[in-house]
Image (spheres, rainbow, N blue to C red):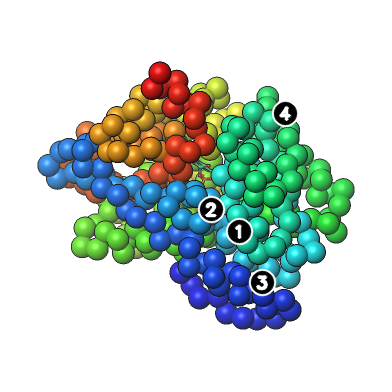
Amino acid sequence: MELIKENRVEDKSLIEGLEQLEKFIGNTPLYPFNRLFQKKGVKIYAKLEWQQFGASVKSRPAFEIVKNAIFAGELDRNKTLLDASSGNTGIAYASICGALGIPVALCIPANASIERIRNLKSLGAELILTSQYESTDGAQNKAKEMFAAHPEKYFYADQYGNDSNWEAHYKTTGPEIVEQLGDEKITHFMAGLGTTGTMRGTGTYLKEQDPNTQVIALHPDSAMHAIEGWKHMETALVPKIYNAEQADDNQEISTEESFALLKDISQKEGLLIGPSGAANLVGAIRLANQLEEGVIVTIIPDSADKYSEVYEQLFK
Ligand SMILES: Cc1ncc(COP(=O)(O)O)c(C=O)c1O
């Protein structure tokens, strides 16, 4: 990761805090799925993203957003970081800002899992619960409204429109994948779309390294899906940072396929992961079955920790 250099930020303890935290953001393992999928010449790898400070893929963008805001003089201990989140970004903000002593306010759909709400409260975040029928779109509208009413009180982080989101993946996730693969060359990168930061940042970096690398975007197959963290672009508020032109291919994944694969991942790989990681692996296995040769890399955004209801249903 880039080294943070001291600059004109008055409160040096914030800089020291960022420097300490940066060591624990990213640098996640690249895990080979050898038991789940076996075919000569084709390999599937995934970044185990819950293994970092803040416990999910969203630690990377949350840290980059907070760091850049502090350096721009837009965020300090006298302002409150405000954003909308379905949970993981909120937990990452609350962890990072908690460690830095910066207050956090989050607009979050009221049907977010009990574990998410409990974790956020435990980390000291102020929660503004929004309509469960409007998902994260309703939460985004509420955050915008709060910021418009009190711009002096808040730093509006806006993960859906903030370039620091995808730039975090461009600077860290992409380079880590290339370095971890060593002599093995990636042929395909795939990731599901939420804010689209993972896809845009990692995909852009990998294409720059080798334009032949195929970048594949994964989507939920309907508006009524249960793949937490994914957005159905046709019916949702499209994130400002989304670059629809970027992907070489787009694929749809169903909630049913993802939940079915969660069982295999638990019992064949010994990994307890979240549904969106399983959905990414459904896409990876589907592609792997069509290839003669290839190295497919995807992302496991979070662990099973926040999905006890899903797991209780699957393993009754
Ligand atoms: C569990 C989970 N999976 C996938 C994603 C999608 O990642 P991105 O926002 O980078 O598109 C998110 C984003 O919040 C998430 O929380």
Residues marked 3 and 2 touching at CB (< 8 Å): no
Give the image location of residue 56, x and y in percent: 49, 48
Of the image marks 2 and 1, the number of the one nearer the N terminus: 2
Q: Which amino acid does label 3 sit on?
A: Leu
- Please indicate whether residue 52 sits to the left or right of residue 131 in the image: left
Q: Is mark 1 on a helix, strand or loop?
A: helix
Q: Judge by depth and name the residue closer to the eye, 96 or 176.
A: 96
Q: Judge by depth and name the residue closer to the eye, 257 or 223.
A: 257
Residues marked 2 and 1 touching at CB (< 8 Å): yes
Q: Which amino acid does label 2 sit on?
A: Gly
Q: Name the residue under label 4.
A: 131
- From this view, report whether residue 34 is shown above or below residue 73: above
Q: Can residue 217 be seen in this view?
A: no
Q: Residues within 10 Å of mark 4 (few under 14, many from 20)?
A: some
Of the image marks 1 and 3, the number of the one nearer the N terminus: 3
- Please indicate whether residue 305 sits to the left or right of residue 234 in the image: left
Tag nearer the camera, 1 or 4: 1
Of the image marks 3 and 2, the number of the one nearer the N terminus: 3
Q: Mark 3 points at which residue?
A: 14
Query: Looking at the rendered structure, which numbered label has been put on residue 96?
Result: 1
Q: What's the distance in space between the residues labelled 1 and 4, CA to CA?
A: 27 Å
